[in-house]
Amino acid sequence: MDDLLQRVMESVKYIKGIIKETPKIAVILGSGLGSFASEIRDAIEIPYESIPNFKTSSVEGHDNKLIYGTIYGKPILAMKGRYHYYEGYTMQEITFPIKVFALLGVSKLIVSNAAGGINKKYKVGDIMLISDHIKLCGDSPLIGPNIEEFGTRFPDMKDAYPRGFRSLAKEVAQKLKLEVQEGVYAYMTGPQYETPAEIKMLSVLGADAVGMSTVPEVISAVHLGIDVLGISCITDETLSDKKISHDEVMQAVASVEKNFTRFVVEIINNI
């Protein structure tokens, strides 16, 4: 057995020994969005460090816990915190949990992030459904030998964010009377924020928002046959002359967290 597949199976075996039912839905919570976890009923917290082969994040706002429980009676898994390429992890390490989710039986993934708004129509506190992405990083989680148990050698990314999943989310937003944007997410590795010239480039390329996560996980999920819904919380206006700090990003996330939480809870209810 391939070493990576063996390590994934070790993690799967450990988690299966703790959870009660097969989760079909998983959620990855971005920076500062961890309060969603309080909506999970009968929650079981599994620290990342206790799961074989899992890593931990060193970034503020990431609690390093896998949470199992139910929402509207549906068993789910939620990652309260993720790891990033800029922390020194490889693409394969960043996406390791996605492989574990797939082998646990997950078929739907909701992935969230804090992002800088590029589209001039966006404002701080907006929620954006990701319709597509631009990956401005040469590395990929699929580089290296392909493991057939995970997926095809050359996965098609034309429908990485399925239209049907986004339509469901938009219907939910309408019911909640919640205004949501829809746009293209650009992935930059960070950890430095983008220069004005880079933001201008991204705008020309058609990006509506920019961030330092999500895309590696989405690529891995598509490879594994998992349907993805991507949600960005707009935390700053990158075209502004105002300097950006992580503290201000976290404050902006706090302003949108309540709407984000009820939005995702109702999406899960309607899946």
Image: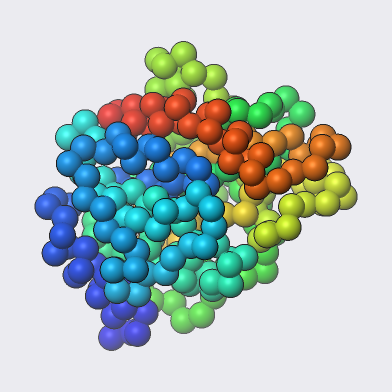
Residue 270's quadrant in the figure?
top left
Measured as percent of width and height from the top left, residue 31 is found at: 52, 47
Measured as percent of width and height from the top left, residue 168 is found at: 40, 28
Q: In this view, does 262 lie above or below 96?
A: above
Q: Quadrant of the C terminus?
A: top left
Task: Please name the colour scheme applied to the rendered image.
Answer: rainbow
Q: In this view, does 163 lie to the left or right of 194?
A: left
Q: In which quarter of the image is the N terminus?
A: bottom left
From where the camera sits, is residue 200 visible? yes
Measured as percent of width and height from the top left, residue 124 is found at: 66, 29
From where the camera sits, is residue 184 visible? no
Residue at 47% across / 53% down in the picture? 62
Q: Which of 224 and 242 is in front in this view?
A: 242
Residue at 15% across / 60% down in the picture? 18
Residue at 83% across / 51% down in the picture? 195
Residue at 61% across / 34% down in the picture? 252
Residue 14's quadrant in the figure?
bottom left
Q: In this view, does 79 lie to the left or right of 248?
A: left
Q: Nearer the viewer, residue 42 or 239?
A: 42
Count of numbered circles on the image? 0
Residue 212's quadrant in the figure?
bottom right
Measured as percent of width and height from the top left, residue 197 is found at: 87, 50
